[in-house]
Amino acid sequence: MAPGRKPKSAGPAPPSSTLVLDNGADTIKAGFVTVDDDTSDNAPRVIPNCIARDRHNKTYVGAELEKCKDFGEITFRRPVEKGFIVNWEAQKEIWDRAFFDDKAPQRCDPSTTRLVLAEQPNSLPALQTHCDQIVFEEYGFSSYYRGIGPSFNAYQDIQAIFHTPRTPDTIIDVPAEVILLVDSGYSHTTMTPILQGRPLHTAIRRLDVGGKLLTNHLTRLLSVRHFDMRNETYIVNEMKEAACYVSLDFKGDLDKTWKGTRGERRKDYATGGGIAKDYVLPDSHTRFHGIVRDHEPGAAARARKSAVSTEDILTLRNERFSVPEVLFNPTDIGLRQPGLADLVMQSLSVLPVGLWPGLLANIVVVGGNAKFVNFIQRLQVELLERVPDECVVRVARPEDPIVSTWLGAANFARHEHADRLAVTKQEYEEHGAAWVARKFALGLGVDTSR
Amino acid sequence: MNNFGVIEVASTATKTTPGWAYVPDTGPSLSATALQPKNRKRAARNTQPGLSLSDLTARQENKLRKDLEALNRDNQRDVNIPVPSSSRSSHKHTPTVRKILQSQKTFANHLDDYQALLALAESNPAAVVNNPLLFLNKPVVATPQAKSASPAPVREKGGSKRGQAAAKRAAVKAAAAAAEEEEKEERKRARQLAAEGEDVEMIDSPPAPPDEVEKLVETYPADGTILPAYRKRPPAAHPGDDDPLLVSVVPSFPTDEELRSLMTAPPLSYMDSRAAFGEEGERYPIRVFCEMCGYWGRVKCMKCGVRVCGLDCLEGHREECVTRYGL
């Protein structure tokens, strides 16, 4: 991956080890990359990015959440809001425990390490400056680059994600020539067209629907229809991840899950119609995680009637698909924004038509929401309705969409672009935070052809 | 003030009351129209004149806004989880770091600050020319192409924010004249810096000797410097290739100039990048669902206007509706 690098004539050689951080609102993806070893199969460590407190008032910071057994009524404090690091007091504590303490599992010495940090596009300048100041003045990393997360994805082997047929001697372009990246994460969903690893800033669009909003929406639906789940965000989130899917035929599925008019008992409703699922809630004594089962008519009623009820069962019907539907139709919950497919078209509409075929044929979806069943199929179907007939639309997601940005950033750290873009501590001390921010905002430029 | 012995303790909990900001008053004065409304009936509820039936009343708008705010919360109730103090010997922070660590601002506070700064720049450009926080996101690449390539920003219905943004852009342009020279220097330096660190390029060499391939390959796009032309072997010829019915229209490829301006355009601000409906608004009517069971909302409750799917759900809803509004 790394071409033969000649040592820089001026300044110290770049540090050999790089800490690659994708500091998401829900989880931090972190790992070390050294320039020499070219192992592409290393995976990052995924650390919950929160300080949590359970109902016994015990506090868990970051990775300690693994030790927690009882997630009932757990509350979270998150340093990242809307995708951007806002509360540095909490963020520093989580970083310290993960990377800088004596007993930290991924201990690193900042003075000999480069930091590559992924951030969301269109951040506020004040927050960016805070981040730069903390990195250099508090931790003292020897070299640092803060880049927008979506564009790191271009440094992966994109055509492998699409399973494009190719001969073994094909040269893999890194960064990929042209992709349209959809990043659907915890706080929001962004579209980023990327040419040669450079994001086209004027076409970046953001939809304020993310995993958090979907979980809260499911919580609200369940609280109206079943139990009060409003304090059980964690449990509802597990339920969403296990049971929700994107519907390819919304109308049809909705009809199948309707109980019918008064007095009528529709057959699909009674049998579940292939859609209804029973979700067994954790009881926090024997079961700490919920279980999804096929719908068994009458099971919930029987459990309720029997004196020694062993399990609480929730029957999920149209909640299963009407929750992720919000991504495609945000107006369903009153949010006045276009859905994903319309958003892709809006993003394309500010670009020259000549770029459309390339972008539409290379749509990559990353982020936790990409894990919903049928997500990419639905996006592809909706886009085919909107684009000219002759356009090929290919939508794909990487094997693990959550760590995809990290893997891209790790490849970036080995690429020569990292040396071109990174800022050293000396430069920061010489020119100040404003200069650093301007340099990061300028990005690669186009003057060299690659 | 005595305050009955109650001492207020600082907390990280935030209230949902909006912050304040200096906003220039450019549009027609709202207060004047409010004094002499055309339609006096339910004036408090129908704040905007000329609403059609499908538009929402102020009450419905408020309910929607509150619902969306609730959906964007991390926890159901306000919690204040202190950072557990570790026994680690704390070294001294620099003043800036200490300030950042102690700041209890939320994202909404930062956004308000930023908007206030933009509004200030609009009304008084001279005051903020040197404020780094404003121009970080606007590295002045004031080339004519960059301007032409900037998108027609998607407009919101109220449009006041967008108006600000547009005016801000004008202000930035004005300030740019002053800062341009400096910026050019900066960019030159950055480019030099990049050139210094430049490495041996890995050029994708064409797999076959060029003279042989050139016969076979029509380069598309025309060989530019930014996107290299397609140099691989084209697929084997097919007898239907010349069929006029099968010929597809290939859009002309953007020139290097266009691409260059797109790739060097500065990032949009947080507000500008938010997706919104275009000029024509939503293309389809909003779908409504049953509040109780989630099926299509086909029936409206006469009391409160909530949609339900049928009699069963309506009865379920009535129980709640009666407790809230009375019989």
Image: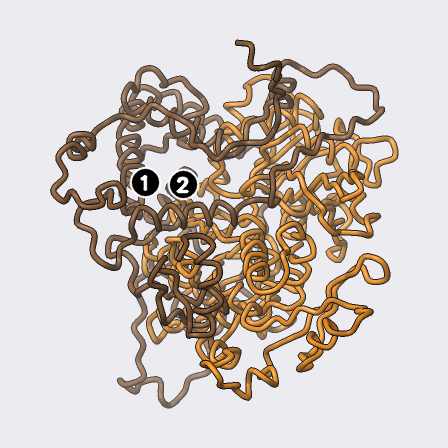
Chain colours: A orange, B brown
Furthest residue to the top?
B1
Residue B228 falls in which quadrant of the image?
bottom left
Q: Is residue A13 above or below residue A176?
A: above
Q: Residue B264's mark?
A: 2
Mark 2 surroundings: few (<14), some (14-19) or many (≥20) residues within 10 A: many
Residue type at mark 1 is Ala
Q: Secondary structure at mark 1?
A: helix
Of residues A54 and B177, the one nearer the viewer is A54
| Residue with the mark numbered 1 | B146
Residue at the right extreme, as displayed? A103
Splitting the image into 4 quarters, where does residue A358 fall?
bottom left
Chain-order first, disc 2 or disc 1: 1
Are the residues under badges 2 and 1 in a single subunit?
yes
Q: Is residue B232 above or below residue A298?
A: above
Please, which chain is the residue tagged with disc 2 on?
Answer: B
Q: Is residue B208 visible?
A: no
Query: Between residues A269 and B286, which one lies in front from this camera angle?
Result: A269
Residue A262 appears anywhere in the view: yes
Left/right of residue A6 with respect to residue A216 in the rendered view: right
Q: Quadrant of residue A302?
A: bottom right
Residue B277 in picture, x, y percent from top left: 32, 54
Q: Is residue A223 above or below residue A387?
A: above
Residue B184 tag number: none
Q: Amino acid at mark 2?
A: Thr
Report x, y in % for residue A330.
43, 58
* Left or right for B224, reference B175: right
B94 on left or right of A262: right
Residue at 41 percent across and 31 percent down: it is B139
The answer to whether the residues at label 2 and label 1 have Cβ atoms under 8 Å apart is: yes
